[in-house]
Each structure stands twice: as structure tokens, then as C-alpha cells.
Image: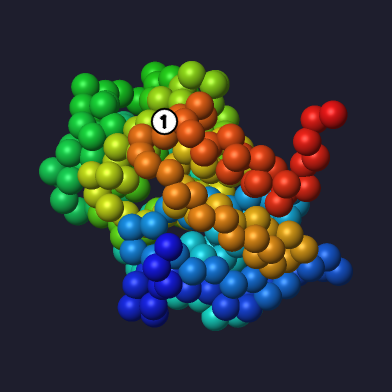
């Protein structure tokens, strides 16, 4: 992988710190994301993955450190966070003046026919696709994704991962993907980072061709390396 220069970067964070009372969650974390790059962020429960993402999204003013994130970014959470009193098209259009962009975004996620539906009428997978459409309508250069598929059943999760791959190939956005799923990280990301004791403890390039599958050559080796970095021992 060629070294990244400052001009390549869309996200740059240095020395990010965050404590909650006596507990230090982030203790000088550094992070770079290049244009068009998908970076997966993994770590144990309570390691600070979501905290770091929220800081980069501008949702945690109590954090310290230097970080640069373009104004043209969008966030997708594990919960779709659709407003139940607004129809689908109006949820997609929150903060967006161009109605055509909203209609196009819904079409891209396969929900053009659900524009006038209420959120309660959607399945979990459909609601999460609306959340992605809402992000796309903002034409982001960076997506910040906090376990966006974590609440979905296995089949819907696979379909959403495939949708993400298609959208990324079409739009070329960069993304930070917080996930606890090692296979998901290797399927979608260009690099997998491990957050441990408040810092980025490992940076693993994922140099596999797209589209990817768990049975692809080299996938299993990377999976084992990433599990080792996460402190998950091999089966006896």
C-alpha cells in the first residue's frame, strides 16, 4: 500500500482523548482515512469505538485532541433513527433542499416505491436502507457508520453489506465502519484497525479483490491475523 500524504486524507485525528469520570476511554488515539478508503474499527466491548466515531461526527464536545473531518459527512447508526411522524421521503430529505436527490437516493437503495410509506410500515432492513438513503442524499465525502448492520438478521445483514459495497463503488465515498464482526470488516474494508487501551494498537491492510467472500483465497489467513490482534485465541 502506497504511503498516504496529507493531501490524500479526508479524516485526520491526532491525540484524541475522552474520559468519563475516572475512566479514560480514549488516551491519545490517532486515525487517518484517505479519500475513497473504507476503514473498519474493531475492539473489545467498551474499547471506545463508538466514542471515537461520535467525536469525529462532532457529537461529543467534551473530547480533546486535533481532528479534521469534512463538513460533507453523514452518520448512520445501528438504530435507523427515522422520525415516525414523517413519511420515508421526508425522513430522507431532512436537511436537504433538493427533492430529486432524495428520490434518487431512495431508488439507489431499492425503495423508490416506499417514498410515501410511514416508518412503522417498514421492515428492519428497509428502515436501515432508508437511513443509508438519508446519508446518500447529503452527497457525503465520508460516511461514519456505527455498527449499521448490527441489529439485522443474518440474511438481511448480508444483503446490506452487498448494498454498501455497490454504493461505495458507485459514489467513491470514504467510510469509517465501527463493527464487532471480523468477517464484516474483511468483506468491506481496505484496512482494519484495532482499538485497545485507548489507542489504535494495530493497522491491518486488507488487500483482497472485490467482491469478496469468506471462502476467497487469503481471507482465512487475514481472519486469523485479525482475531489474533483482537486477542481471540485459536480453537484447541
Image coordinates for residue 148, horizontal then vertical, percent: 50, 40
Does residue 43 show up? Answer: yes
Q: Residue at x 21, y 22 (%)?
A: 113
For the C terminus, the image quarter is top right
Near-viewer residue (85 or 182): 182
Does residue 18 show up? Answer: no
Image coordinates for residue 176, horizontal then vertical, percent: 48, 55
Q: Residue at x 69, y 67 (%)?
A: 199
Q: Classify residue 150 by image quadrant.
A: top right
Describe the element under mark 1 as helix, strand or loop: helix
Image coordinates for residue 227, horizontal then vertical, percent: 69, 43
Q: Residue at x 21, y 27 (%)?
A: 112
Near-viewer residue (107 or 173): 173
Vertical position of residue 70 compared to residue 102: above or below: below
Question: Is disc 1 surrounded by few (<14), some (14 to 19) or many (20+) residues within 10 Å?
Answer: many
Image coordinates for residue 119, horizontal then vertical, percent: 40, 27
Near-viewer residue (121 or 26): 26
Asked if residue 168 lies left or right of residue 220, the reply is: left
Asked if residue 49 lies left or right of residue 58, the reply is: right
For the N terminus, the image quarter is bottom left
Asked if residue 197 lies left or right of residue 180, the reply is: right
Q: Residue at x 63, y 50 (%)?
A: 42
Near-viewer residue (170 or 102): 170
**Residue at the disc numbered 1:** 160
Vertical position of residue 155 compared to residue 191: above or below: above
Amino acid at each position: 500500500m502506497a504511503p498516504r500524504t496529507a493531501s490524500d486524507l479526508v479524516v485526520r485525528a491526532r491525540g484524541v482523548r475522552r474520559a468519563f469520570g475516572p475512566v479514560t476511554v480514549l488516551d491519545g488515539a490517532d486515525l487517518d482515512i484517505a479519500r475513497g478508503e473504507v476503514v473498519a474499527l474493531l475492539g473489545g466491548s467498551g474499547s471506545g469505538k463508538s466514542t471515537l466515531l461520535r467525536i469525529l461526527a462532532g457529537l461529543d464536545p467534551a473530547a480533546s485532541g486535533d481532528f479534521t473531518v469534512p463538513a460533507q459527512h453523514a452518520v448512520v447508526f445501528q438504530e435507523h433513527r427515522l422520525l415516525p411522524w414523517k413519511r420515508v421521503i421526508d425522513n430522507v430529505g431532512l436537511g436537504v433542499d433538493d427533492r430529486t436527490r432524495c428520490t434518487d437516493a431512495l431508488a439507489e437503495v431499492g425503495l423508490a416505491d416506499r417514498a410515501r410509506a410511514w416508518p412503522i410500515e417498514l421492515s428492519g432492513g428497509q428502515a436501515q436502507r432508508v437511513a443509508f438513503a438519508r446519508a446518500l442524499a447529503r452527497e457525503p465525502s465520508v460516511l461514519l457508520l456505527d455498527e449499521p448492520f448490527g441489529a439485522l438478521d443474518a440474511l438481511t445483514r448480508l444483503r446490506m453489506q452487498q448494498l454498501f459495497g455497490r454504493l461505495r463503488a458507485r459514489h467513491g465515498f470514504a467510510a469509517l465502519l465501527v463493527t464487532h464482526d471480523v468477517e464484516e470488516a474483511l468483506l468491506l474494508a481496505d484496512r482494519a484497525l484495532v482499538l485497545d487501551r485507548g489507542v489504535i494498537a494495530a493497522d491491518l491492510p486488507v488487500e483482497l479483490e472485490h467482491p469478496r467472500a469468506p471462502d476467497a483465497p487469503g481471507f482465512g489467513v487475514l481472519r486469523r491475523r485479525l482475531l489474533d490482534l483482537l486477542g481471540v485465541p485459536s480453537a484447541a
